[in-house]
Image: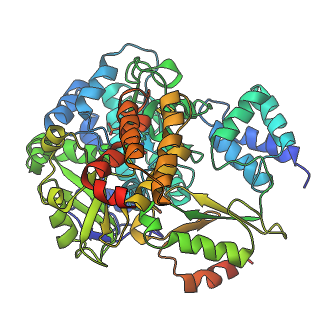
Amino acid sequence: MSVNLERIREIFSDYSPEKGNFMVLLHDVQKACGNWLPEEALMEVSKLAKMPLNKVYGFVSFYTMFSTQPRGKHIIRVCKDGPCAVKGSLMLADLLMKELDVDMGETTDDNHFTLEETACIGTCTASPAMMIDDEVYGNVAPESLNSILKKYR
Amino acid sequence: MKYNAKILSTDNVLLKNVGNIDPLKIDEYIANGGYEALKKAVTMDRKAIIDSVSDSGLRGRGGANFPTGRKWLFTYNATADQKYLIINADEGEPGTVKDRILMEGDPHQIIEGMVIAAYAIGATKGFIYIRGEYNDSIKTMNAAIKQAEEKGMLGKNILGSGFDFEMRVAMGGGAYICGEETALIDSIEGKRGEPRLKPPYPPVEGLFKKPTIVNNVETIANVPHIIAKGSEWFRSLGASCSPGTKLFMLCGDINEPGIVETPIDLSFEDVIEKFGKGANGGEIKFAQIGGSSGNIFTPEMLKKVWTYERCCEFKVSYGTGSIFVCNDSRSIVDHLLTVAEFFEHESCGKCTPCREGTHRVKQIIEDFAFGEGTVSDLEILKELCLIMKRSPICGLGQACVNPVLDAIEYFKGEILAN
Ligand SMILES: Cc1cc2nc3c(=O)[nH]c(=O)nc-3n(C[C@H](O)[C@H](O)[C@H](O)COP(=O)(O)O)c2cc1C
Ligand code: SF4
Ligand code: FES
């Protein structure tokens, strides 16, 4: 997928140039690039933000939500922390790996789903929990997995 | 509200509106007495607001329990051309959902608290730093900010007082360490979120080197109530040394998981029994209180009322207020491994004792999980943990060994039998 530099410039002009917006900008840039940050996009960001490329890269590599590797159209994040672990999130992760035929961190061959682990997503009173893109799912029962995935297929 | 946490009980202070009003309608908040405290505050002397918060005995709800009024005073007294107020909504402690429910259920309570705080300390700009995974919170807060601006509760000349305050949402990117206030500040500045060496402390030198107050969401949500009803009313709730109500979250092996608002005058066992309908799948073996870096409580300890004073005495903390119950079918080693993996991943890597230490701690626990740990491994683990308690530069490295040390104390036999 080629990077739409025009869109990146638009994102930068949408925000006031004031400090404090850099993370918000990068989230939007990542969305515009299809869930990851290709090098060309980072170079454009570096130019627009007047920040050296190595600083931009250092920033991006620090935060788990950003990726410099291609990812699928939909990102599935399964919580792996304590409250979810005791309520079956490991089994959930196993089921997802089987169903999608990928390992943790991998993307399906058709580039449709990327499966990731995540730290707690604040849904611990409804464990096990997972997110697909922006949507949170709590109390995920193994039986319900397929009907949830169907919405994104 | 899409959020799926059940409210098990409330004292109708912080959760008064949650589930009862439409969070996206400022008029419903106002009709329920909202923004009355702000109207009162802008007629008050700034110092009097801080005194009132100090007198109330309010302590920070982000984990460190620092007296809020005392913190505000540092920034109030600082001279600077710009001061900032930041609300910490990076909520990342496993087991913790309270800030989310406050943002998604009653966003104006937070905004009102922020404007009052900003007015008191003299900050004209503010941020609420929300973790990147909390999409609904981000959307709700953004919508609420817009409405508050339209109503004149935010922006220029708020309620005709001559006071200006502008606030925005800042986002996280999936890094637990950004909950630490100086890492959070660096993150807003567009940097990697690595904690700063202190001093200087943020109230004197924080965001863009200006005096900055960082408060937790739950802390700031208390402020409108204190201003509206007074510090004496606040003090009448709960134990004398930890007044007010607190949000507790029940999760893990519990019949009725959910969120509870109660003054701190109940034991955790009572909270578990009364609101969570007890443990399920067996008897309680232990509970971890306050998140991944929280202490491990035995059933015996859960019987006590953990006021702030008692916590100091026994050197434990109730942290964020999450109560993660594990029944007697759970393995302590498995639990420690989950916790150790979390910290190995979340250590920012800035200082060696934590970067290397979290890795080694995980390795040794892994050995026990695979049945290969020895008595001397356990001794090394304990020594390592004691070193880590002292040497890292921030609270992550220092506190992440708490559950390990507790487990070694209470469950040594089980760990060695593994
Ligand atoms: C590793 C680490 C993570 C933290 N995470 C949070 C957090 O997610 N939310 C929060 O409010 N405070 C968190 N804190 C505490 C903050 O540094 C700070 O003390 C707090 O936001 C102050 O607000 P308060 O006085 O209202 O509690 C964390 C501290 C450390 C050391
Ligand atoms: S203690 Fe750990 S998280 Fe804190 S600064 Fe050091 S390496 Fe980073
Ligand atoms: S532990 Fe899984 S959502 Fe919090």
Quarter of the image with the C terminus of chain B in it: bottom left
- Protein image colouring: rainbow
Classify residue A61 as left or right of residue B369: right
* Residue sitting at the far top: B79
Ligand 1 lies in quarter: top left
In the rendered image, the vertical position of residue B305 relative to residue B316, given as above or below: below
What number of labels is visible?
Answer: 0
Give the x, y percent position of residue B289.
29, 54
Classify residue B234 as left or right of residue B276: left
In the rendered image, the vertical position of residue B320 relative to residue B161, given as above or below: below
Residue B144 visible in the current orientation: no
Give the x, y percent position of residue B126.
46, 34
Q: Depth check: give the residue in front, B184 or B323.
A: B323
Q: Depth check: give the residue in front, B118 or B186.
A: B186
* Residue sitting at the far right: A2
Give the x, y percent position of residue A22.
65, 36
Give the x, y percent position of residue B44.
22, 31
Give the residue drawn at x 52%, y 39%. B347
In the rendered image, the vertical position of residue B183 relative to residue B276, given as above or below: above
Q: Depth check: give the residue in front, B36 or B83.
A: B83
Give the residue drawn at x 69%, y 40%. A61
Give the residue drawn at x 47%, y 60%. B371
Classify residue B78 as left or right of residue A96: left
